[in-house]
Amino acid sequence: MDIRKNLLTAFLVSGLSIAGIPAHSYMSPEASTLYQEACSAEHQQDLKGAISKLEQAIAVSGGDAMLYTKLAGIYSEIDEFDKALENYNKVIKINPDDAFIYISIGSIYESQAKYKEALEAYNKALDLFPEYKYNYFNLGNVNYQLKNYKEAIKDYTSFLETYSGHFEARENLAASYLAIKDYENSEVQYKLIYDKNPDNFKHFYEYGISLLNTNDSEKAAQFLEKAIELDAENYSAHLGLAQAYQDLGKNDMSYEQYQLVLKNVPNLNTVRLDYANLLADMDKNTEAVEQYNMYIKAYPNDVKGYINIANVYKKLQNYDKAIENYLIAIPKDEKNINLKKDIANCYHNKKDYKTALKYYDEVLADNPKDFNIRFNKALALHALNQYEDAIVLYKELLSEKNEKTIKNNLNDAIVSRGHELVKAGDTKDAISYFKEAIKGGYSEGYVYYGLAKAYRHDGDNTKAAENYEKAIAIDPEKTAYSAEYSDFISALYSTNVDVTHSDNSSDLPSINLTVNAPEVSKEKEPPKEKEKEKPVQTTAEKSAVPDVAVKKSEEFIAQGDKNYKENNYDAAVKNYQDALQLVPNDAVTLLKIGNIYKMKEDNTKAINFYQKSIIVNPEYTDGWFNLGLAYANENNLIESQKSFEKVIELNPDYNSGYAYYALGMAFEHQGKKAEAVKNYKTFIKHNNDKGLKDTVEEMIKKLQ
């Protein structure tokens, strides 16, 4: 702000009383004549002549207040301020209560930038004549120059109560508010000035900065753009505009303004923090780190630099560098709980859960109800296998917020604790934990796998088998489950097999179940192929079973085959299940039971037994093929597709290429025509049945 000089010429009115203040003394006729001649000379701009006449008058009269006042005023006009002050001081000796003499003295001191002396003079005038409101303007100007902005604001406000239309005083008041960063009041004053006379408004930069700091960034940008239009080298305006654009999310435009400022004012380090923040927002992380480092070098005690650069490193998952800077920031801002949260988060992401817990506890000591920190602490405890503590905390959180994530984590911790107890041999408590998890909605196979292990440990083989099967059905891809189940079955019947019972069926001929290429869907059915024999014993595991048990098992299978041929399906299933009690890992017998259930259109049980057959023998192509058919009947085309693809992987020429036909059907019903055609064509290459090939070729034409 340019505070203008306000040299108030003394109110030199000869022989008059101003505001009740009388002229001090009587002037002789000769002195009066000389005074009039001095006034005439002054009027004619003969200031030296005027001074001469006044000095003569003073010599004649012996000194009169009016003569000294007039002489001081002329000396002021010709900038001989010392002489002016000398004469004003003579007036004060004659008339110490003349307020306007003090105003004139204050004006001279103000013009000489002797603001303390000016302030003293103006205050003296105020004491003598408080009714003279214009003096507040003088006081405001001097206080502003002395940076007594709050006093200046009081003075300008008092002045404007009387002279509300005084343009310069309102400008100076706005500038005073801006100087103390009272942006709301400065914005109000600049708005009044702008609204009153927008065509002659000059303070675009100041108004823009006020608007920027009162969160009216859009309007601020307009005024700052105008300020730059008037003065392209106003880099403060460029900087303000950069910040306004940044607030408005116009990052590219903000970036241009920052670059322009730093190019022209490269040592302006104060701006680098905001610039770095912009770069970080724009994912210009390398540049952001560079700018933060320059800011930190210039302002090593400013905690914001360390926090913000740490935030960028955290975003980049460079947790070591993030922690390094957060730790520098902590001693500079010990009460900043968010810093400790950030450090804990970094250690957590580094999987240094022990150190993370230390900081979580420090945060909770200050704010024990912080929900998110308690949740993170529970996660850390969980990761450290401190399941009991994690479970307690999860339950506490769940009582406050019934959130799915918390419930899932709680159940996972409960199941993990259950497995831990199984390993320790505490199966009773383990089973309680597993059941609690199931009751809480845990549905993954891992819980049933745990129950199976616990029941197996306790010798409850029925429940063990039941839970192994549930685990495998839920997570068939978990080979550990099926491997352990197979081991369990083998171990279960390896000794102490009771073979005393006989149903006199050993003399019946053995009937081996054959695998045809049945329907893939209810809409299309390929012609039947000649049956091919499958050996009853397909796995080496039977060698672990006593010969007498194997022989008895074969008798049950033979009886089952007979009942199957005679359509006595329930009896056949019973026979096959009796056989499995003796030799549980017989893939073919499991397949036979699955085929019966499939024929009875009980696809759920069929799928269960087909799955068991491939668990016992993962390379059993018949099991995979029939499983695919069962899935197709359930319209589970994705799993059906996977099963047929497995058949082809194991044996590309399986059943004269029927796996390709079935896979083609699965793709066709998914709407994947190209894949269907490809597999149908491959089927034709593998199959020699002309009639069937013609049928499939017609299917291909329809798809193409």
Image: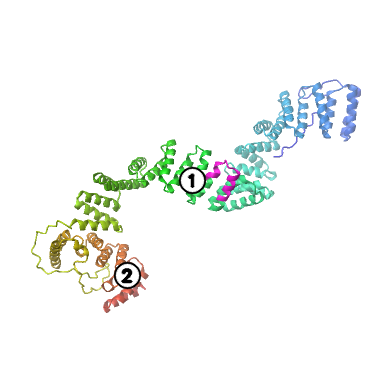
Residue 568 in view of the camera: no
In magenta stretch: residue 446? no
In the image, is residue 198 above or below residue 98? below
Q: Is residue 122 visible?
A: yes
**Horizontally, is 685 left or right of 134 in the view?**
left
Query: Any mark on residue 422, and which?
Result: none
Vertically, is 224 above or below 64? below
Q: Is residue 169 above or below residue 236?
A: above
- Say which residue label 1 marks: 323
Q: Is residue 246 left or right of residue 148?
A: left
Range of magenta residues: 289-307
Say whether disc 2 or disc 1 marks the residue closer to the N-terminus.
1
Query: The residue tagged with tag 1: helix, strand or loop?
Result: helix
Instruction: Residue 664: give its label.
Output: 2
Image quadrant in which you'd find residue 74: top right
Question: What secondary structure is the stretch in magenta mostly built from?
Answer: helix
Which amino acid type is marked by label 1?
Ile
Question: In this rendering, would 359 be left or right of 211?
Answer: left
Residue placed farthest to the right in the image?
30
Residue at 10% x, 68% y is 508
Residue 141 lies in quadrant: top right
Left or right: 51, with 10 as reference point: right
